[in-house]
């Protein structure tokens, strides 16, 4: 059974990881924004870590001359009668051509060089899908934004600071 995860701690950890390792060489500012938002979504911690790492890494690589990457917890949203926690990864890079956006989540031949296989976004898409979530991308000449929706179940069962679901005695016996 997947458990609820403290999404804010994962966002903070990813930002700290990229800053501490110097991956962006100081040219790219990485800003996590998690304050005053619900913290819990039903997702595997390793899956969310891999999703965010791939997306932030792609954003940094898209801005060799520098820029801004924001990892934002946008709180709860309702879609198709379900509640999701919305995370946005937004950069100020040059954007993606529409032909690339149209095929974004399919494996492709990478244009980044031999060390890249062109599988990152298809893996991200699969991990979001396995989490019963959704992912979408929008891009313009002012940057690219990935929006991830992760299920939260019944929002009444979550506290703002809890990193697990509180089950009633009846649910535990099922």
Image (cartoon, grey):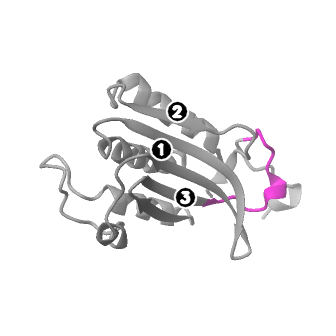
Is residue 74 shown left or right of residue 50?
right
First to last magenta residue range: 150-162
Classify mark 3: residues with Cα within 10 Å, few (<14), some (14-19) or many (20+).
many
Asked whether residue 140 appears in the rendered view, the answer is yes
For the point 34% across and 70% down, the residue is 98
Percent coordinates x, y for residue 38 in the rendering: 74, 47
Marks 3/1: CA–CA distance: 13 Å
Is residue 103 shown left or right of residue 158?
left
Labels 1 and 2 touching (C-beta < 8 A): yes
- The answer to whether residue 166 is magenta is no
Look at the numbered disc 2 and give the secondary structure of its residue. helix
Residue bearing the label numbered 2 = 13
Asked whether residue 43 appears in the rendered view, the answer is no
Q: Nearer the viewer, residue 23 or 46?
A: 23
Residue bearing the label numbered 3 = 148
Classify mark 2: residues with Cα within 10 Å, few (<14), some (14-19) or many (20+).
some
Marks 1/2: CA–CA distance: 9 Å
Of the two numbered discs 1 and 2 on the same chain, state the one appearing first in sequence. Answer: 2
Is residue 97 shown left or right of residue 135?
left
- Position of residue 46 relative to residue 172, above or below, is above
Residue bearing the label numbered 1 = 49
For the point 16% across and 46% down, the residue is 115
Classify mark 1: residues with Cα within 10 Å, few (<14), some (14-19) or many (20+).
some
For the point 76% across and 38% down, the residue is 161
Marks 3/2: CA–CA distance: 18 Å
Q: Which quarter shows the C terminus?
A: bottom right
Q: Nearer the viewer, residue 77 or 150?
A: 77
């Amino acid at each position: 059974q997947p458990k609820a995860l403290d999404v804010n701690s994962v966002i903070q950890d990813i930002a700290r990881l990229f800053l501490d390792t110097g991956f962006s060489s100081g040219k790219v500012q990485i800003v996590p924004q998690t304050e005053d938002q619900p913290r819990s979504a039903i997702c595997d911690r390793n899956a969310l870590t891999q999703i965010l790492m791939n997306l932030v890494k792609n954003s940094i690589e898209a801005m060799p001359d520098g820029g801004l990457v924001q990892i934002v917890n946008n709180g709860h949203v309702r879609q198709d009668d379900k509640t999701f926690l919305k995370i946005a990864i937004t950069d100020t890079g040059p954007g993606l051509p529409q032909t690339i956006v149209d095929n974004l989540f399919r494996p492709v031949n990478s244009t980044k060089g031999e060390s890249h296989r062109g599988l990152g976004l298809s893996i991200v898409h699969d991990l979001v899908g396995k989490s019963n979530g959704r992912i979408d991308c929008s891009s313009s000449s002012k940057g690219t934004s990935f929006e991830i929706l992760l299920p939260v179940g019944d929002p009444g069962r979550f506290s703002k600071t809890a990193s697990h679901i509180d089950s009633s005695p009846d649910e535990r016996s099922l």
